[in-house]
Amino acid sequence: MTNLPSTLNDWLALLESRHAETVINMGLERVRAVKERMRLQFSCPVIMVAGTNGKGSTCSMLESILMRAGYKTGLYIKPHFLHFNERARLNGDMASDAELVASFNAVEAVRGDTPLTYFEFTTLAILHLLAHAGLDVAILEVGLGGRLDAVNVIDADVSIVTSVDIDHVDYLGGTREQIGFEKAGIFRTGKTAICSDPVPPQALIDHATEIGADLWLMGRDFNYSGDKQQWNYGGRGMRRNSLAYPSLRGANQLLNASAALAALEALKLELPVGAQEVRHGLVTVELPGRFQVLPGRPSVIYDVAHNPHAAAALNQNLGNMGYHPYTYAVFGSMHDKDIDGVIKAMSEHVDHWCLCTLPSPRAATASELAAKVQMIQPDQHEKTVNIFDDPAQAFANAISRAGENDRIVVFGSFLTVAGVMAAQKSALH
């Protein structure tokens, strides 16, 4: 192909059109073949993070702490909210269009007639970008599952599985044991394998044992304790005391922070990090859309909780926020999610549902969501359910009705949060 796209937007449009027919194509043979032709390898430690929930938070904490310690970091994280560039970060900054275009060209130059999905192609491009950036450490977030995810063509020095819960049933299976096995696919023989799920599936433990990975389990090999003011990490051979709570709010963040500190303990010879850097890194970490409370009134909270496990954590976090007369929920979801489970987990706190249809063929319609809400929360006094064509309209309705002491929680699919973020951004300009 001689005339390749010259802009990032044109490249993304080409990939979307080219791979419309290959939605998710399981198996790593094609990705591995192209990776070999690209001679893609990392000359720095690689930390890989999988899990149902908590992946992004754990990656961001690692990035923040390691940057404070003076290391040059590279991060692959997904999906993105407003710009594709958010997926590739160098020292905390988004990769430029030019860097991404060069890496897309590098994949295309050797791909030949090997078909790659949009996700596989962009993953190889971002891995190429990071591998050539002169990094001290690369942090890679795994997408769906683990074993068959395109990121897994790289061998990590430390692999983390944050939590194992039911999600993506069509691809990963319907039990925690099946999903645990898929996630454990990122573990490597002789390398550190960390699981911060307090109740790890036996299949994950068995797989780690079978391949001879060095498995670190929460509660056995590392742990945390704390009071209202501060918390402590205890690992196999390292304690870190009097730590500040992470700036990311929420019930599960100490599990995620402990996994990050276990990874740093495992890499203490290659990437030594001092107590001060850990404290600063945790206090300054930022991650959009994870129990993100915006300044101003009424309170607006963004959270990409789209499965029952994440929705239960969001519900708990809402309960810890103090009194608000009414809670408005702007909610949109993909069809294949456990929507009933998410609504049940959130119904305790939501008074007014503003339901929206998302811009994806996989989305549930607002009317379908409304039928589910009405089944789970039958006509209760003062509770309302309204439907909208998109997240921006749903949010505009919530803002128009909410009092200054109320709160609006925008949650569900990434597309729900991204739609509201984009609308608010254009309102500012």
Image: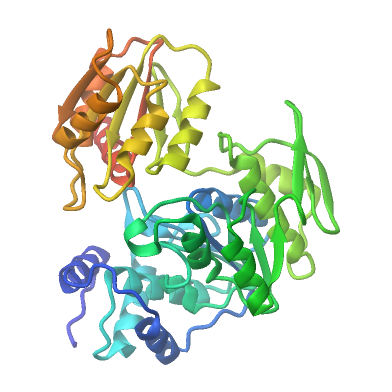
Is residue 302 depicted above or below 33 in this figure?
A: above
Quadrant of the image for the N terminus? bottom left
Residue at coordinates 32% horizontally, 76% vertically from top-left?
A: 104
Residue closest to the eye, 407 or 295: 407
Residue 4 appears at what percent x and percent y?
21, 79
> Does any portion of residue 136 appear in the rendered image?
no
Q: Is residue 238 left or right of residue 342?
A: right
Relative side of 330 to 193, left or right? left
Image side of residue 75 versus residue 426, left or right: right
Residue 183 seen in this snapshot: yes
Residue 51 picture location, percent across and down: 51, 56
Way the structure is coloured: rainbow
> Image quadrant of residue 330?
top left
Write the residue at 70% across / 66% down: 215
> Is the residue 289 above or below the residue 54 in the image?
above
Q: Nearer the viewer, residue 45 or 185?
A: 185
Which residue shows up at 41% across the image and 10% down it?
405
Q: Is residue 363 above or below residue 314?
A: below
Residue 295 in the image: state x and y as whole percent.
Answer: 45, 24
